[in-house]
Image (tube, rainbow, N blue to C red):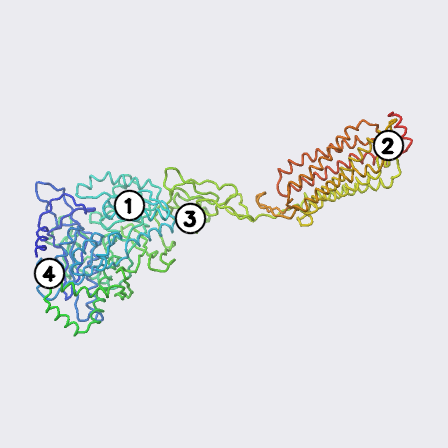
Amino acid sequence: MVLWELLLLLMKIPQTRFWDDTASCVIHDPIGTSHKYYKIGELMIGEIASQMMIFLDEYSFFEYPIPDSDNPSVVTKNYQYVLALAFAVSEINNNLQILPNVSLGFHISESYFNPRRLYQITMHFLSTQYRFIPNYKCDIQNDLIAVIGGLGSEISHHLPNILDIYKMPQFSYGNFAPMQRDQTHSWYLYQMVPNEIHQYKGIIQLLLHFSWMWVGLMTMADGDGELFLQNLLPMLSQSGICSAFTEKIPLVFFFEDFLNLQASWNKIFVNVMESKANGIVVHGETKTMICLRELLHEGQAEYKKTFGKVWIMASQMDFAALAFQKAWDIDTFHGALAFAAHSHEVPEFHLFLQNLRPHMTKGDDFIQTFWEQAFSCSFPNSNFNRDDVETCTGEERLESLSGPFFEMSMTGHSYSIYNAVYALANSLHAMYSSRSRSRIMVTRERLKYTKMEPWNVIGLENSYLHPFLRRFSFNNGAGETVHLNENGESAMGFDITNVITFPNNSFHRVKVGRMNPWALSGEDFSIDDNAITWPRSFNQIHFGPEKKSIQQIPTGICFCSGMVIPLSLCNDKCRPGYHKRRKEGKPFCCYDCVPCPQGKISHQKDLDSCTTCQEDHYPNGEQNQCIPKEVIFLSYEEPLGMGFAISALLFFFITALVLATFVKHHNTPIVKANNRNLTYTLLISLLLCFLCVLLFIGQPEKVKCLLRQVAFGMVFSVAVSCVLAKTITAVLAFMATSPGSNMRKWVGKRVASSIVLSCSLIQVVICTVWLVSSPPFPDVDMKSVAGEIVLECNEGSVAMFYCVLSYMGFLAFVSSSVAFQARKLPGTFNEAKSITFSMLVFCTVWLSFVPNYLSEKGKYMVAVEIFSILASSAGLLCCIFFPKSYIILMRPDLNKRDQLIKRKNLHI
C-alpha cells in the first residue's frame, strides 16, 4: 500500500508550476473538481470525458494558483460523447437478447483536457463511489470491467500505465499515434477508430485524387503536432507532394496569451493567405479547433480578407466552439473535406436527445453546466448566474443549437463510443454463454481457496474478455455489423465528409467518400466529385451569353468534365507538348514548363519528360500527339513524277525522230562525215538514257532497284564513250589529211569501236562488282524526313555508286579536254565545237548534282538524279544533233558533197 499512499500524497500537493509541457491550447489545474456522471450497475464501464476547459489568470508566486473549477468553459459539442455512453448502456440494459441477467453501469469523469488528471481518474474508477481508496470495494457490485478513453493520443498512451496491471480492456475512440503503440500495450487496447497511419494514407489518396501537389500543413505546437509532421511529411514526399508551408499554432497558457499571441496569429494568417496552396491539411483535436477559430477570427478582422482555402481535416478535428465564439462566422469552413470515424444513423439516439431534460437525469454533474453555456442561461443558485442572462427553464430544445455547439445526429466519435459499449456487452455475453455455471462456481471456489489479492481477482476476470474481443464481429443497436481485427482495431474505416455551412452558423455534413484500408485493392478509397460543394470563392465562373462557353476561370480552378475543382499547385500544370524542368533552389513541386525537344511529344499534362514517337509515327506541330507517318515515294500520280515521265517520253520520241532522220538520210555527206555508226550508237544510248528515268519513278521494287543505277551508269558510259570516240576520230581524220602523215592507218571504224567498247567495258566491270558485292535493294527510311516514311532503293554500297559516277565523270572530262583541243580544226570535218559545248553542259549538270543530291532527302533525292539524267542527256542531244538535223531538214542545199568540198577549200 506504500505505492498508493505515495501517489495520493503527490496528487494532494498544490501545483506550483506555471506551465505544463503536456498542455496544448489551454492550461488548467482541475484537482478537486467534481464533474462526473455515475450510474450504478453490476458491471461498470469507465469513461474519460473531455469537455471542460478551465482558463487561468497568469500564475503569481505570491499565492497558490486556485483554479476556477466551478465555472469552466464547456465544449458543449463534446457532451454528446457522454450521452452516447449513457444511451448505449440504457439500450443494452433494455435488450433481453444481450446480458439478460446482468445490468451495466458507468462512471464518467471529466479530464479537463489535462493528461495529469488521468491517473487520479483511474484511481477513482478503481475505488468505491464515494471513497477514494483504490482497490477497495464495499459491495460486490460496480465492478469495473473496461475503460473508454477520451480524445487524444496522450490519454490512450497514459491509461495503460495503470490499467494494464489489471489486464483491463481499454477502448479508445480518439486517435492513436502509430509510433506510440508498442507490444506492452497492444494486447489490452482496442481502437474503435483505425490506426492514425491509415488516416495519413487516406489524406495522401485524397490529395492525389485531386492532383493537389502543393499543400499547406497546420497543427498545434505540441508533441502530437510534431509526431503528425514526422509521419506525414515523408509520406507526402514519397507521393510527389510538397509542403508549401508548415504552420504551428502557438500554445495558449493564460488569458493574457490571447492578447500576446495576436501578432503571431496574424502572421500565420497572412502566410497562409499569401500562399498559392489552396489545400490545407489541419491536424489536431477539440482544443486545436478552438485555437484555429481564434486565429482565423483575429486574422480576418485585422486584414478584412475572406479565407478562400479548402480545409482537409483529420478525424479528431470537429467543428467545436466555446460560448464566447457563438457569434463567430463559420463560413471559413464551408466546403471543407473532413475525415471522420465511420458512423451510422441511430434514429433512437435522435429521439433520446429530443427528450433530454436537466431535471430528468440523475447522477449527471455535466448537464447543468452544459445547459447553461449551450443556451446562455443560468439556473437558480448557479455560479454562472449573471444579470445579463435569462433563467434556464429546462425545456430548451437541443435541436435549436447550431452545429458547432451540438449536433443531433450521432457523430463519428459518439458512434465509436456506442460501438465500444456494444463490443464489450457482446463479448461479455459470448463469454458467459461459453462458460457453464458449474465451471464458474469451481473457479470462484479456487479463487477463495488461494486467497488472491482483490486486484488480482479483477485482473483474472478481465483477462477472460480479451480472447473474445480479438477478431470479434457483432451487430450493434443500429443493425450494422462491426468488426475488430486481430490488432484490436475497428475495421470500419473512415467516412469522408463535406461540410456545408449556412448563414445562421449551422452546418450540415454530407458523406462524399469512404476510405477503408481493409477493403480490396482499388476499392479502399472512393469519392464522389459531383457531391462535393467547394468553398464559395471557387464557384465564381462566368459563362458566355449562351452559357455554353466559359469567359473567365479564376486562378486556382480547374474546369474538368463540367465540374469546378480547385487546384493546389505551386505553378500551373504543364500542358501537353511541354515537360517539367525543376527550378533551382525550389521544392520539386515547383518547376518551369519547357517545350519538348524536336522529335518528342508529351501527350499528358505535367509529364517529367517527353517521349519519342514510334518509328512509323511523328510529332504533330503542337508536339502533343504522334501522327502516323505518310508513306511516300516518287509516283506517277503526283505532279513531279508525272512531269518527269512526260519529259522523259518526250525526249525519247525526239531522239527517236532524230535517229529516224539520220537513218533516212544515212547516205548524205553530213551523216557520213563523222562516223555514221558512232552517231547511231550515241543516239540509241540517248534513247536508253531517257528510258532509264522510268526506272526511278514508281514504288521501289527489287528489280527496279537492281537495274536503275546500273543501267544508268552503263548507258551513260556508252554515250560518253561515243562522244569521246567521235572527238578522237575527228582529230585523227584531220591529222591524217596532212602531207606525209602516218595517222592514216588509225583512221577507221575499228579505232572508234575499240574506244567505245573498252571504255564501256570498264564501267560494266565496276557495275558487276557492285551487283555481286553489295547490290541495291528496296528499303524504308523512317528517319530522314519528318512525318514521312520514304520507300527508297538502298544503294547497298555508296562507294560503288560514287565509283560509277566518278568513272562517268572521268570519261566526260577526257572527252571535254579532247574536244576543247580540237575546237579550232576546220569546221567541215569538225564536231568538236558542238561536243565541247555539250560536254560543258554535261559536266556542269553532274558537278552540281553531287551537292544537291547530298542536301536533299527522300523522294527529292531521286528527283535530283532524274533531273540530272534528263538535263545531261538533253544537252548531248541538243548540242550535237540539232545543228545537223537543222541542215538535213531545213537546209538540204548545204548537205551536198560539193558544198562540203567548197567549205573545205575555204578553210584551207
The dot on residue 744 is: 2
Asked whether residue 609 is in view, the answer is yes
Look at the numbered disc 2 and give the secondary structure of its residue: helix
Nearer the observer: mark 3 or 1; the answer is 1
Which image quarter holds the C terminus? top right
Earlier residue among tags 2 and 1 = 1
The dot on residue 218 is: 1
Look at the numbered disc 1 and give the secondary structure of its residue: strand
Residue lying farthest right? 898
Q: Amino acid at mark 1?
A: Met
Give me the residue at 14% from left, 43% from top: 18
Give me the residue at 87% from left, 39% from top: 666
Earlier residue among tags 4 and 2 = 4
User: What distance separates the C-alpha of mark 2 from that of mark 1?
Assistant: 114 Å
The image quarter containing residue 269 is: top left
Q: Which residue is mark 4?
A: 135
Earlier residue among tags 3 and 1 = 1
User: What distance separates the C-alpha of mark 2 from that of mark 3?
Assistant: 98 Å
Is 864 situated left or right of 475 in this image? right
Where does the image place residue 311, in percent across and percent down from the top left? Answer: 31, 48
Is 114 situated left or right of 343 in this image? left
Q: Which residue is mark 3?
A: 559
- Residues at discs 2 and 1 in contact (Cβ within 8 Å): no
Nearer the observer: mark 1 or 4; the answer is 4
